Image (tube, grey):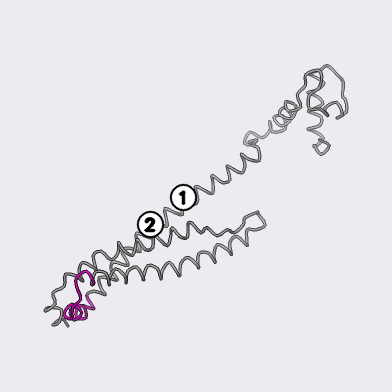
């Protein structure tokens, strides 16, 4: 209580005097939290804070827990927006992977025809294209995740004076790796079907 500013001290004593009819007294009268006359110390502090912030209509009083929760809610909204942007980037990358795999199948038509001629089944052809797509997606994840962690470490280090710390989200990283694998499988559907349905005789004469 001794560390309160003078105007808060005056408000508390003024409230005490008004509620009890007493003159100004020392802080020892407030030591037990409630005066025998019925003055609640919590009411005194609430009144003092209300009077102090009366001239600031935009000011909002919150407890430490409420303040931390409001900050966490704001960061949660930002993270949701980033996840939405990440989803859009995955969709765009799917189109790029499909385009690349389709071109690869057309360029390797003769090679695929020869493989089919020596005994490769349609299922094996689909599996080969699917594995190529998954490997491509994992290469992208292997390059993107460490780069993202490096940039996050730099940003948190720059903001460390504001209490921002760096933590490694293992669950989220595992989820992103799984998303990359699923994206690779989805991107390989059309090219793998094209590779499995190729005509062997036509492919052997393809230039």
The dot on residue 188 is none
Q: Residue at x 22, y 75 (%)?
A: 106
- Outermost residue toward the front in this view: 119
Q: Is residue 169 magenta?
A: no
Query: Horizontal placement of 24 versus 162: left or right?
Result: right
State the image coordinates of residue 8 (x, y, percent, origin top left). 78, 32
- Outermost residue toward the left in this view: 201
Q: Which residue is mark 2?
A: 88
Q: Does the CB distance between marks 1 and 2 fall below 8 Å?
A: no
Give the camera-side residue of 131 and 153. Answer: 131
State the image coordinates of residue 33 (x, y, percent, origin top left). 78, 27
Q: Residues within 10 Å of mark 1 (few under 14, many from 20)?
A: few
Q: Going from the N terminus, do you reach mark 1 or mark 2 first?
A: 1
Seen in the picture, residue 49 relative to 92 is either above or below; the reply is: above
Secondary structure under the numbered disc 1 in the rendered image? helix
Seen in the picture, residue 37 relative to 188 is either above or below; the reply is: above
State which quarter of the image contains the N terminus: top right
State the image coordinates of residue 206 (x, y, percent, origin top left). 15, 81
Give the camera-side residue of 12 and 39. Answer: 39
Part of the protein shown in magenta: 106-124
Secondary structure under the numbered disc 2 in the rendered image? helix
Q: Which residue is mark 1?
A: 80
Q: Is residue 112 magenta?
A: yes
Splitting the image into 4 quarters, where does residue 118 fall? bottom left
């Amino acid at each position: 209580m001794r560390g309160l500013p003078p105007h808060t001290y005056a408000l508390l004593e003024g409230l005490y005097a008004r509620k009890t009819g007493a003159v100004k007294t020392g802080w020892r009268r407030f030591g037990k939290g409630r005066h025998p006359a019925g003055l609640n110390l919590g009411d005194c502090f609430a009144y003092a804070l209300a009077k102090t912030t009366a001239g600031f209509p935009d000011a909002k009083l919150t407890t430490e827990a409420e303040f931390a929760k409001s900050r966490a809610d704001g960061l949660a909204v930002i993270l949701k927006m980033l996840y939405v942007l990440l989803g859009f980037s995955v969709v765009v990358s799917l189109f790029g992977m499909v385009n690349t795999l389709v071109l690869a199948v057309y360029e390797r038509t003769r090679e695929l025809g020869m493989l089919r001629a020596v005994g490769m089944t349609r299922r094996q052809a689909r599996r080969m294209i699917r594995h190529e797509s998954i490997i491509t997606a994992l290469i992208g994840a292997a390059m993107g995740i460490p780069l993202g962690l490096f940039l996050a470490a730099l940003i948190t280090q720059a903001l460390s004076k504001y209490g921002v710390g760096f933590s490694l989200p293992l669950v989220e990283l595992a989820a992103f790796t799984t998303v990359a694998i699923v994206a690779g499988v989805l991107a390989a559907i059309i090219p793998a079907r094209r590779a499995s349905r190729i005509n062997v005789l036509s492919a052997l004469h393809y230039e």
